Image (spheres, helix red, strand yellow):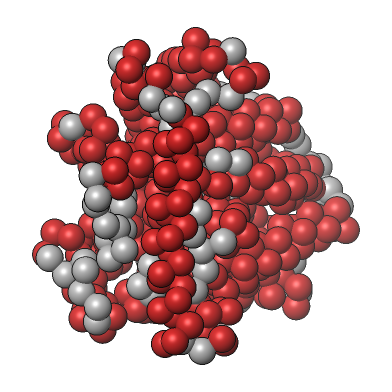
Amino acid sequence: MASEKVETVIAGNYLEMERGEEDSKSAKSKFSKLFWHGGSVYDAWFSCASNQVAQVLLTLPYSFSQLGMISGIIFQLFYGLMGSWTAYLISVLYVEYRTRKEREKVDFRSHVIQWFEVLDGLLGKHWRNVGLFFNCTFLLFGSVIQLIACASNIYYINDNLDKRTWTYIFGACCATTVFIPSFHNYRIWSFLGLMMTSYTAWYLTIASLVHGQVEGVKHSGPTTLVLYFTGATNILYTFGGHAVTVEIMHAMWKPQKFKLIYLIATLYVLTLTLPSASAVYWAFGDLLLTHANALSLLPRTGFRDTAVILMLIHQFITFGFACTPLYFVWEKCIGVHETKSVFKRALARLPVVIPIWFLAIIFPFFGPINSTVGSLLVSFTVYIIPALAHMVTFAPAVARENAVERPPSFLGGWAGMYSMNAFVVVWVFVVGFGFGGWASMLNFIHQVDSFGLFTKCYQCPKPKP
């Protein structure tokens, strides 16, 4: 019975996307399809990997200075695997929801399924409302963080303008993402974004090793519980980039093939984050405690300027990744989501960018804001809620018997899966939200007390007399 259902899902999804492809052959050039229309497994992998590691790459050495080398490495591996697990849960729930709806003859060709709709269809309106709140709030602040990172990075090439002014400029630039219709259209951007991040990661690694350790370098972390849990929640945030999993899956021609994509993307990301964070922390040690952006400690060279420019472009791409689901929600609210006109949808999306722009100017705390968002929002959005939703969805025996996707055999069936989900919920609630929320809020309040809201130039060097 279950195998018949899986076959139905595969056939339904494939035929739906195939019709779209046939239309595109008659309407779009081969060049447009090559760079603009993506829905393959490879497109999904590039989207996941590119979205997962962006500006946070520059703050991981800062987290290592708070955690210490050993804890930093352990937390990256641990949260990388945990993030992959909950991304898998989200993919299972998406396929389950879509299967049920397609059996009811629901047509999704002009509608993008989102996480809150999955929760609504499987568990009801209360779950939908909670999921919508956490997902939208997280993506809102995720977009804010990308905008803050743009201003922080460009300052190291051109300090003639303060970071607040750069935020105004890049806010206007990032607003152009309203013209990108959906995740189908990120094919070339995802590829380029990952290449840019890969360059920056290996630049940080090699430049730090070539630079060597600064005179009198100290590696005293961890020194306080506040710093320790702040660093841990930044890593929780790092591997919590799968709030857009449903939208990426929906853009695939065969969404049921997503299962291991996020895990493979995470393994690649770890080859970037572990060497770069370790090398920078080895070279600069405790200096990173007051330099949240790793680029600020490396001498200015052509290689560093290239890394800054590439990260700026990638942050523009990641801004689009985080903002596109918000655009979809807003379109559905005002009734233009199924409109064919790209220009009309773009105009409708513009109001979404304004609060992001404003929040980036109020809270320009590059680094500390990551941990705060990680503990208060990421912990629920992509860890606790997916694990709980999976347990509740398949609690009835009939739901388990008719499940489209059954638990991996190596886990020991449903009992093993429930045990894994329960561990995720308890760990993230206690360590991520509890201790992490306490520590990151104290650190965030300290930044407000030290620099103030609307600060013009966060962590900028004092002008020489």
The image position of residue 22, as x and y in percent, is: 45, 76
Q: Is residue 165 above or below residue 139?
A: below
Q: Nearer the viewer, residue 5 or 44?
A: 5
Residue 193 in view here = yes
Q: Quadrant of residue 322?
A: bottom left
Q: Is residue 409 left or right of residue 340?
A: right
The image position of residue 189, as x and y in percent, is: 55, 72
Q: Is residue 264 left or right of residue 230?
A: right
Q: Residue furthest left?
A: 334
Q: Is residue 216 above or below residue 337?
A: above
Q: Quadrant of residue 130?
A: top left
Residue found 43% across the figure and 60% down from its top? 15
Residue 65 in view here = no
Residue found 79% across the figure and 54% down from its top? 205
Locate the C terminus by quadrant.
bottom right
Q: Nearer the viewer, residue 104 or 418?
A: 104
Locate the N terminus by quadrant.
top left
Residue found 13% across the figure and 59% down from its top? 333
Q: Quadrant of residue 398?
A: top left
Residue found 65% across the figure and 19% down from its top? 410
